[in-house]
Image: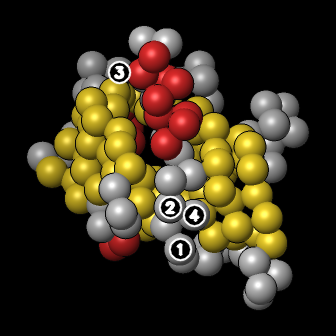
Amino acid sequence: MDMDTGLEHKFARFGDGIEVQDGTLIEGYASLFGECDQGGDVVGKGAYARSLTDIAAKGRSVKMLWQHDPAQPIGVWDEVREDTKGLWVKGRLLDTTQKGREAASLIAAGAIDGLSIGYRTVKATKNDKGQRLLTELELWEV
């Protein structure tokens, strides 16, 4: 957990259904439901629903940040939604920014192989395997 912001992070590899096209277009799953992640957590279906509704109602958007740094936006998410599989995102790296160009180059070279989300846990329980089951998350950025 990041002590400065209180945000937690989850990682999804490009091989888990994330595609990068033309070096700047990104589309796929930033989080998958029902799968145990590296931290031993499982995200439940519907965990992002309230957060996405609140973000839309406030006229805000989910941020695309470089290394979770709010001072370094690198693109825009044109679509962020839940489906039965997980949290699906579609967006564009902005090649008009230095960090956006760097991110595109690193992705093309294979040095970056996935996305991670920044979120706060709102509701969680333990499942029968002792894993944390995240049932409501407040999504901040991808």
Q: Is residue 99 above or below residue 123?
A: above
Identify the residue position indicated by label 4 in the image: 44
- Mark 4 or mark 3: which comes first in sequence? 4
Q: State the residue at coordinates (65%, 56%).
A: 135
Q: Is residue 87 above or below residue 55?
A: below
Which of pointers 3 and 1 indicates the residue nearer the eye?
Answer: 1
Residue at which label 3 appears: 97
Which residue, given by chain and number where applicable, does mark 2 sit on?
A: 45
Circles 4 and 3, Cβ within 8 Å, touching? The answer is no
Q: Amino acid at mark 3?
A: Thr
Q: Residues within 10 Å of mark 2 (few under 14, many from 20)?
A: some
Q: Disc 1 marks which amino acid?
A: Gly
The CA distance from mark 2 to mark 3 is: 35 Å
Please report contact status of discs 4 and 2: CB closer than 8 Å, yes or no.
Answer: yes
Q: Earlier in the sequence, mark 1 or mark 2?
A: 1
As helix, strand or loop, the secondary structure at mark 3 comes to loop
Q: Are marks 3 and 1 in contact (CB under 8 Å)?
A: no
Q: Cα distance, mark 4 to mark 1?
A: 6 Å
Residue at figure coordinates x 59%, y 63% from the top left: 43
- Counting residues from the start of the chain, the first of labels 4 and 1 encountered is 1
Q: Secondary structure at mark 2?
A: loop
**CA separation in Å, label 4 and label 2:** 4 Å
Q: Label 4 to label 3, Cα distance in Å?
A: 35 Å
Does the CB distance between marks 4 and 1 fall below 8 Å? yes
